[in-house]
């Protein structure tokens, strides 16, 4: 039987680069892996389909938002092994917790919050980026817009794709949940990036539960399963120890890399020039 680690790598939810071809990050730094939890729906292609549907539905009649995307996630639950596994993990953990409603935030949380609400027969609170909140007593039926105090006395379990520093929680999800009068005591996320999110949630009185952590043992397991090479694992270890040192060591060993990226134009050129301007490239400024 496959584990969540198998599916994280199989779907490219965690994707590790060739040691000779690291990824550019938006900050102008280089790194050896990407995390896209929502690819667990089956693949990048299916994830992009659902993202497009979520964006379209969120821009239309939001009372029909959940019922519009429900058929998509139900079909994926029936046909995608990776998605069924992670949803079943969430449902089993949720059964151990005390809550009245499930909440999810725009956009990727909906990948993982809607199906558990459907399976458990729980109401769903949809939180949108513009601050609007819609409550679905039954996810198969139309939702209603809710505001201050409308859900007084209710306890919400928030379900998310991943947690990094939990800034989305502290800036948006928790204030929105409390704003409609509900409490939040627990949250479930698929992945913990181990960047302070758990501590930040604890300050808000929220317990966090996850199924995978972005730490070296995950990549060790990838090597043991024959998914990753030792060179990829060592590259990740160097990056985790010191991301800037990793980048400078790579660029020193590959002196033509920056010029090659600039020659490509587009985003590689933008990232390379950003790296130079921020002092990440040895001997260039």
Image (cartoon, rainbow, N blue to C red):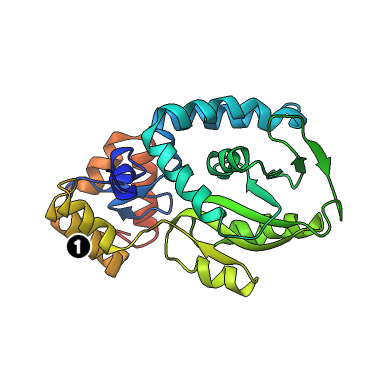
Above or below 129: residue 29: below
153 vs 192, left or right, is right
Question: Residue 44's spot in the image, x, y percent?
Answer: 39, 33
Question: Residue 6's spot in the image, x, y percent?
Answer: 28, 45
Question: Residue 3's spot in the image, x, y percent?
Answer: 30, 48
Residue hosting label 1:
249
Question: Residue 76's spot in the image, x, y percent?
Answer: 47, 29
- Along the line of sight, which residue is nearer the eye, 45 or 31? 45
* SS at badge 1: helix
Q: How many labels does the image show?
A: 1
Above or below 203: residue 254: above
Seen at 68% across and 35% down, the residue is 139
16 vs 104, left or right, is left
- Find residue 143 and report its image quarter: top right
Seen at 46% across and 58% down, the residue is 210
- Find residue 37 and report its image quarter: top left
Q: Residues within 10 Å of mark 1 (few under 14, many from 20)?
A: some
- Along the line of sight, which residue is nearer the eye, 118 or 253? 118
- Tell me, yes or no, if residue 144 can be seen here: yes
Quadrant placement of the N terminus: top left
55 vs 262, left or right, is right
Quadrant placement of the C terminus: bottom left
- Along the line of sight, which residue is nearer the eye, 210 or 284? 210
Above or below 41: residue 239: below
Seen at 48% across and 60% down, the residue is 164
135 vs 211, left or right, is right
Seen at 58% across and 68% down, the residue is 201
- Tell me, yes or no, if residue 39 can be seen here: no
């Amino acid at each position: 039987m496959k584990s969540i680690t198998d599916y994280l790598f199989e779907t490219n939810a965690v994707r590790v680069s060739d040691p000779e071809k690291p990824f550019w990050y938006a900050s102008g730094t280089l790194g050896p892996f990407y995390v896209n939890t929502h690819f667990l729906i089956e693949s990048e292609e299916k994830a992009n389909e659902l993202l497009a549907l979520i964006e379209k539905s969120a821009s239309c009649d939001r009372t029909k938002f959940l019922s519009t995307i429900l058929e998509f996630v139900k079909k994926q639950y029936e046909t995608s092994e990776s998605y069924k596994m992670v949803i079943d993990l969430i449902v089993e953990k949720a059964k151990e917790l005390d809550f009245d409603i499930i909440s999810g935030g725009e956009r990727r949380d909906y990948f993982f919050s809607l199906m558990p609400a459907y399976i458990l027969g729980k109401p769903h609170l949809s939180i949108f980026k513009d601050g609007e909140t819609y409550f679905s007593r039954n996810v198969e039926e139309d939702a209603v817009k809710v505001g201050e105090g409308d859900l007084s006395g209710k306890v919400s379990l928030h379900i998310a794709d991943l947690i990094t520093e939990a800034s989305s929680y502290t800036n948006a999800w928790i204030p929105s949940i409390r704003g409609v009068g509900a409490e939040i005591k627990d949250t479930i996320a698929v992945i913990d990036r181990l960047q302070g999110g758990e501590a930040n949630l604890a300050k808000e009185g929220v317990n966090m539960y996850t199924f995978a952590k972005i730490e070296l043992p995950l990549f060790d397991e990838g090597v043991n399963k024959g998914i990753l090479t030792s060179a990829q694992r060592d590259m990740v270890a160097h990056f985790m120890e010191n991301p800037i040192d990793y980048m400078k060591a790579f660029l020193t060993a590959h002196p033509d890399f920056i010029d090659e990226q600039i020659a490509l134009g587009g985003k590689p050129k933008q990232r390379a020039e950003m790296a130079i301007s921020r002092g990440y490239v040895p001997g260039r400024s």
